[in-house]
Amino acid sequence: MGGLVSALVLAKEGLKVCVLEKNNQYGGNLQTFSRDKLIFDTGVHYLGGLSEGQNLHRYFSYLGIMDDLQLQQMDPDGYDRITFGYDQTEYPHAQGYDNFIEQLVKNFPDERENLQNYCEEIQRVCNQFPRYNLVGKDHYNEEVLHLNTKRFIESITPNRKLQSVLLGSNFLYAGDSENVPFYVHALTVNSYIQSAYKCVKGGSQISKLLIKRLREHGAEVHKHSEVSEFIFNDGNVLTGVRTKAGKEYFAEKFISNIEIRSAIRLIGENRLKKSFLNRIRSWEPVSSCFSVYLVLKPRTVQNFNYNLYHFSSEESVWNAYRYRKDAWPETYMLSSTQSKHNPDFAESLTAISYMDFEEVKEWQDTFNTFAEGHDRGGDYETFKLEKAEKMIAALEKKFLI
Ligand SMILES: Cc1cc2nc3c(=O)[nH]c(=O)nc-3n(C[C@H](O)[C@H](O)[C@H](O)COP(=O)(O)OP(=O)(O)OC[C@H]3O[C@@H](n4cnc5c(N)ncnc54)[C@H](O)[C@@H]3O)c2cc1C
């Protein structure tokens, strides 16, 4: 998304642009895949800020993809719903700030004023990010950058349950409510409170449209083109890149949209300032996730037009990513896709929970992509199957009681 959008902005501004993608599908985390003729998303499951006048709508309109996107608005009274343990109550995050407050006040009648303060503060913080709002010059208020999510939420309300409900979608920023700056929480939830949409037929329609527009603007786009080397001249200026297949591309300017540690390896540490390297090294990599994709028998599960964020307890919201292996999955996000033939029912479900890198460390030197297929072996298949079974057991426990 980042690379394709950067490329399209430059192409629209008249520059000669070339995109190099290592995989078979463009879009990275926007990729989709299909099983049993059903489409599944790998990364992006829902998007915020897509109603007229809102930020993503404006960006996508400028990029020329807005009118061609097939979108479905999620439930206005609860696009995300938070649940705890075996309590059947679903605490909603509703669209529109007034509605967000009204829907939560039903569960927390004494908290209206605190919820109003929460909403005001979210919007105040978001208003200080010029590029997010497409106004003014780049200038960031230091005070806002250093606010901490945990301290902020605790200052809003002493009600522990409401605190957990407000943080309930923190899976979107890897669950670390204790360390994450408040602006990350604010920018994320604000976007969905404004409006929340699903991409009908998956998020890859965004990357397909971006590629189409890139081609219309004369850009070159190449897949199966993994950049494996940067080429520098004698003056240490980056002049070209070499792909794994040995092809070289020369240009005046380069934009890297890959994970920053991988980019540093390609640049070479000796070319970068120590202070910069130390800052990157000090960042703890966040937890990854494990997704289970379920194709349902017809008319078995009612469709729901929202995401369910489930936690085994209120407390687990605070550090769900530090899960106990034997109790996995103590938390998950569940979404459904409406059946084309029986609209009241779901045709598929996606359940996602945290997965620490340690769990897959033994396969760290293996990979299996469409572009380069490799077998990771029977142990890996068993690992995946066991995890999937655990997730299905957890879902059955929650939905059958
Ligand atoms: C499970 C999951 C669920 C998510 N859900 C949502 C959601 O519901 N809503 C939402 O808004 N966001 C969601 N996200 C986040 C969103 O998907 C990502 O933030 C976004 O897609 C990241 O885009 P990117 O351009 O930064 O990086 P990426 O998508 O990682 O793109 C990087 C690209 O670079 C390519 N590449 C890597 N190395 C090389 C190389 N050496 N040479 C050439 N190409 C290379 C990769 O193949 C990839 O295509 C989710 C993410 C995950 C993982």
Image (cartoon, rainbow, N blue to C red):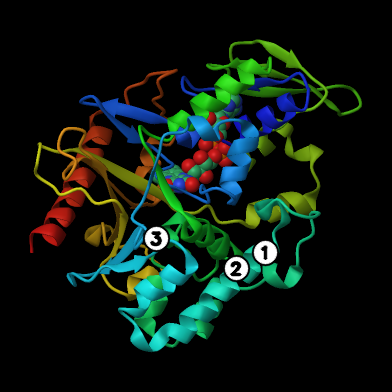
Marks 2 and 1 in Cβ contact (< 8 Å): yes
Residue at 78% from the left image edge and 22% from the top image edge:
15
Residue at 55% from the left image edge and 78% from the top image edge:
152
Residue at the extreme right of the image, as rendered: 235
* Residue with the mark numbered 3: 321
Identify the element where label 3 is drawn.
loop
Residue type at numbered disc 2: Gln
Marks 1 and 3 in Cβ contact (< 8 Å): no
Front position in the image: 259 or 197:
197
* Residue with the mark numbered 2: 123
Query: Residue 249 location in percent, x, y?
Result: 72, 15
Which label sits on residue 127?
1
Pick the quarter of the image with the N terminus: top right
Badge count? 3
Mark 3 vs mark 2, CA separation in Å:
27 Å
Residue type at numbered disc 1: Asn
Splitting the image into 4 quarters, where does residue 90 fall? bottom left
Upstream in the sequence, badge 1 or badge 3? 1
- State which mark lies toward you, 1 or 3: 1
Residue at 79% from the left image edge and 55% from the top image edge:
136
Q: Is residue 70 above or below residue 130?
A: above
